[in-house]
Amino acid sequence: MFSLSKLSLPLQSVGLAKAVGIIVISAVILGCSPKLDWRAVNTERLGYSALFPEKPKQAERTLPYAGLQLQQTLEVTQIDDAIMSITTIVVPSSINTQAGALLEQVQKTILQSANSAQTQPIRHPSQYLIAGPGRNKGLAEDYLFEIQNPSGKRWMRVRWIMRPDGEGGSRIYQQSLLLLAPANAKAFQSELTAEKWDPFFDEFRVQ
């Protein structure tokens, strides 16, 4: 059993910490499963669908930003020592011009955890699906890195996507895979990009 309460990372502010749902939600303990039994999860109100290896837990919080309380939703599941999550931040039209700056701050907060392990993130070209006929794709970039914290070393793969919501605002998606690193292992890049995780990353589809 692996608890999210053990996933503490160094963060600069409480507000930005809330943007990283996989780190800040500490009250949920997820059950384990011995296999990857992929199933579709359609979160229409948040504008995406994805494949998870089991039904994800969901939690909602608010993120203080620019004088507003932004909606933040986390869907997360755990299989053995792997935690998969999708965090969505809804940016309303009234501050949509600041959506890019918010995304940069969220990225900076996460990537600083790699600095604590003294490893440079590896950038891995990736794609995501766009709703519509066929398999139209958008370009993205995955970041792969190690994390050091008191409970042990972790490996993380994270991707950010920002999309318009059709109402003048935006949605920021953070798609993450967190692995408990085996002792003395160094090949974290191959582990994080292993074929068994492809359904989670390759079948993520946005409106």
Image (cartoon, rainbow, N blue to C red):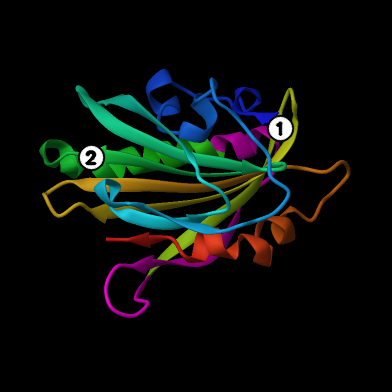
Residue 67 image point, x, y percent: 19, 22
Segment colored magenta: 112-137
Residue 26 sits in quarter: top right
Residue neighbourhood size for the residue with mark 2, other residues' Cα within 10 Å, grouped as few (<14), some (14–19), many (≥20): many
Is 197 contained in the magenta span? no
Q: Amino acid at mark 1?
A: Gln
Residue 16 image point, x, y percent: 40, 27
Q: Quadrant of the C terminus?
A: bottom left
The residue wearing badge 1 is: 148
Residue sitting nearer the eye, 55 or 204 = 55
Q: Amino acid at mark 2?
A: Val
Q: Earlier in the sequence, mark 1 or mark 2?
A: 2
Whether residue 43 sits left or right of residue 181 in the image: it is left
Residue 78 image point, x, y percent: 62, 41
The residue wearing badge 2 is: 91
Q: Quadrant of the N terminus?
A: top right
Dot 2: element: strand
Dot 1: element: strand
In this view, 91 is above or below 142 = above
Whether residue 48 sits left or right of residue 76 in the image: it is left
In this view, 175 is above or below 141 = above
